[in-house]
Amino acid sequence: MRTIESLGQLRGRTVIVRCDLNVPLADGVITDDGRIRASLTTIRELREAGAKIVLISHLGRPQGEPEERFSLRPVSVRMGELLGAPVSFVEETVGEAATAAVSALGEGDVVLLENLRFNAGETSKDDDARRAFAQRLADLGDAFVSDGFGVVHRRQASVTDLAQLLPSAAGRLVAGELEVLRRLTEEAERPYAVVLGGSKVSDKLGVISHLIERVDTLLIGGGMVFTFLAAQGHGVAASLLEQDQLDTVRGYLETAEQRGVRIVLPTDIVVAEAFAADAAHEVVPADAIESSAFGAAGIGLDIGPDSAAAFAQVIAESKTVFWNGPMGVFEMDAFAGGTRAVARALTETSGFTVVGGGDSAAAVRALGFADDQFGHISTGGGASLEFLEGKTLPGLEVLA
Ligand code: ADP
Ligand code: MG
């Protein structure tokens, strides 16, 4: 992996930095600035080296044209506060205004260009369209630093094409993420436990089948629990169930058995009358979900307290723990207990802990935990999962 050193002297040169500044916004206010903070290391280093810095990023999923609610302007303001230096903003990504703003930069100055995805070329499936947009970006600078870890699994103009048009290197955030993920894939200290949750099994098939060959214990929570319970023959009432994944899940249970990998499923479940924050709810054994007060209408929305304690115990005894996917619908306080317990157990264990996944990272912060209580919180959900699946990530391949 080429690092910033490979770019040589940067004083006076214009360096384009692809960041992942895709922060959550509510009415134009940033609700979690974690991704802005994560990008500062590289930017500070480039400023000290005397580079002229052009930041590019996407925010949200605009469909190839400008949409005010996805503007990066609020990010430039917050970035300036965190950096302790002005970060100017241009209302377009490429064009006359962008070119003028970039030529006005002095050594150490920083400009943020408007949302990449306001341009159809950024995510186009058409190679020529993507390449043409990447060329317009490349024309703005002398070198490229790829530091948006959250997008390195995407084949997009500002990720893969741009890296091929300019001298390019991985930024510090990308390099740091990779170091952690390598530690998980190549030299994980044992016992190694993986906690998986979230909404769907089908989202996590690749990572489950890959990890089942490599870990000592797999703890399963979240919405995917119910497909596992159903695969064992238990009724799950109105809980999230992926009927078409039952055979796959049965296969996982068999593989785990053959390999001596322990799959720990919850023994109790918080079942609710409805999918709502104020819904009536009760704790029932995991094999008796249909016997709850809500009968066939009951929805499992969290792992129960006994399960949370059992999961915490496994985590406490592990030397390496990777966690992806909330244990329940943590967005509603009544169903956040399992996620809170797992997060706390991760902060208390002496082992090396990694949290990956957009919602998982948001969950630990929303529940009041600090980033530094964990070994590492990945800024890239999809990217970290794909890496752990053993896939080649296109955005890294171009920096090899
Ligand atoms: P990540 O982004 O960390 O990979 P996912 O996107 O897979 O996580 O899943 C997060 C979502 O899973 C959360 O919004 C949470 O509400 C939901 N979830 C967790 N448990 C359940 C459940 N029992 N039923 C329905 N949704 C659930
Ligand atoms: Mg998610």
Image: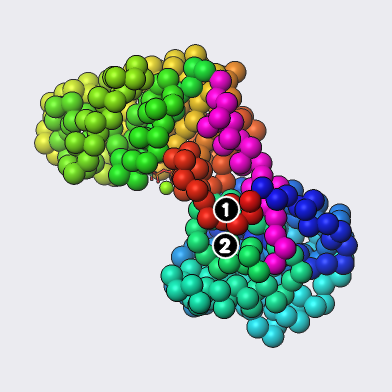
- For numbered disc 2, what is the local secondary structure? helix
Up the image or down, 28 lies above or below 205; here it is below
Q: Under 8 Å from ligand 2: the CB of mark 2?
A: no
Q: Nearer the viewer, residue 251 or 174?
A: 251
Q: Do the residues labelled 2 and 1 touch (CB within 8 Å)?
A: yes
Could one spot residue 342 in this view of the protein?
Answer: yes
Q: Under 8 Å from ligand 1: the CB of mark 1?
A: no
- For numbered disc 1, what is the local secondary structure? helix
Identify the coloring: rainbow
Q: What amino acid is at disc 1?
A: Glu
Could one spot residue 270 in this view of the protein?
Answer: no
Q: Where is residue 302 in the image (x, y as percent from the top left)?
A: 32, 32
Up the image or down, 202 lies above or below 164; here it is above
Residue 171: in magenta span = yes
Please report the residue visible at 87 percent of the width from the left and 67 percent of the height from the top. Answer: 12
Q: Where is residue 91 in the image (x, y as percent from the top left)?
A: 64, 77
Classify mark 2: residues with Cα within 10 Å, few (<14), some (14-19) or many (20+): many
Q: Position of residue 157 (x, y in %)?
A: 55, 68
Mark 2 to mark 1 CA distance (whole Å): 8 Å
Direction from residue 188 to residue 48 in the image, left or right: right
Residue stretch in magenta: 166-189
Q: What amino acid is at disc 2?
A: Thr
Q: Mark 1 points at which residue?
A: 397
Q: Mark 2 points at which residue?
A: 160
Which of the 4 image quarters holds residue 165?
A: bottom right
Direction from residue 359 to residue 86 in the image, left or right: right
**Residue 190 disc label:** none
Please report the residue visible at 70 percent of the width from the left and 67 percent of the height from the top. Answer: 166
Up the image or down, 361 lies above or below 308; here it is below
